């Protein structure tokens, strides 16, 4: 049987609200989707921001979603299984945001070189 997450502010079990998006647990102005740690609005907003920067890395087709998360987990020195933004606190999310930007820089560089090489190969000498 699943238990509601414990509120980190008051130590009580959180309340569960069923929504069209799934279970939302809440207490003391903190909430979580699913049975994860309850966090504040700032943390939820930071998670959205990191996701918006991270998702294009794998959605552009250069690497798979799994490969992108593996790369991020390695660079953050955390287990792959724990490398999900809904499991991260503000400090880890801030590190992830910086790391994602670095991954994007190297990816952009790789894509540029790949495009340049392709153009060079297509030229007739």
Image (cartoon, rainbow, N blue to C red):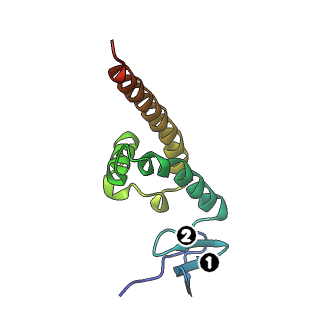
Report which residue position mark 2 lands on: 38
Relative side of 115 to 66, left or right: right
Look at the picture and state if 87 lies above or below 13.
above
Which quadrant of the figure contains the C terminus? top left
Q: Position of residue 113 (x, y in %)?
A: 40, 25
Q: Secondary structure at mark 1?
A: strand
Categorize mark 1 by other alpha carbons within 10 Å: few (<14), some (14-19), many (20+): many
Q: At 34% across and 50% down in the image, what residue appears?
A: 64
Q: Nearer the viewer, residue 6 or 50?
A: 50
Relative side of 45 to 25, left or right: right
Q: Quadrant of residue 46?
A: bottom right
Q: At 53% across and 44% down in the image, what residue appears?
A: 97
Q: Secondary structure at mark 2?
A: loop
| Mark-to-mark CA distance, 2 and 1 | 8 Å
Tell me whether circle 2 and circle 1 mark residues in contact (CB < 8 Å). yes
Look at the picture and state if 87 lies above or below 34.
above
Report which residue position mark 1 lands on: 27
């Amino acid at each position: 049987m699943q238990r509601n997450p414990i509120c980190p502010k008051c130590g009580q079990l959180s309340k569960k609200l069923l929504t069209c998006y799934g279970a939302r647990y809440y207490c003391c102005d903190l909430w979580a989707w699913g049975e994860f740690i309850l966090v504040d609005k700032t943390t939820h907003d930071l998670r959205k921001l990191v996701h918006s920067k991270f998702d294009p890395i794998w959605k552009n087709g250069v690497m798979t979603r799994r490969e992108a998360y593996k790369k991020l987990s390695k660079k953050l020195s955390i287990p792959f299984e724990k490398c999900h933004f809904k499991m991260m606190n503000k400090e880890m999310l801030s590190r992830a945001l910086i790391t994602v930007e670095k991954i994007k820089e190297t990816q952009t560089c790789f894509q540029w070189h790949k495009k340049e090489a392709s153009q060079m190969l297509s030229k007739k000498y």
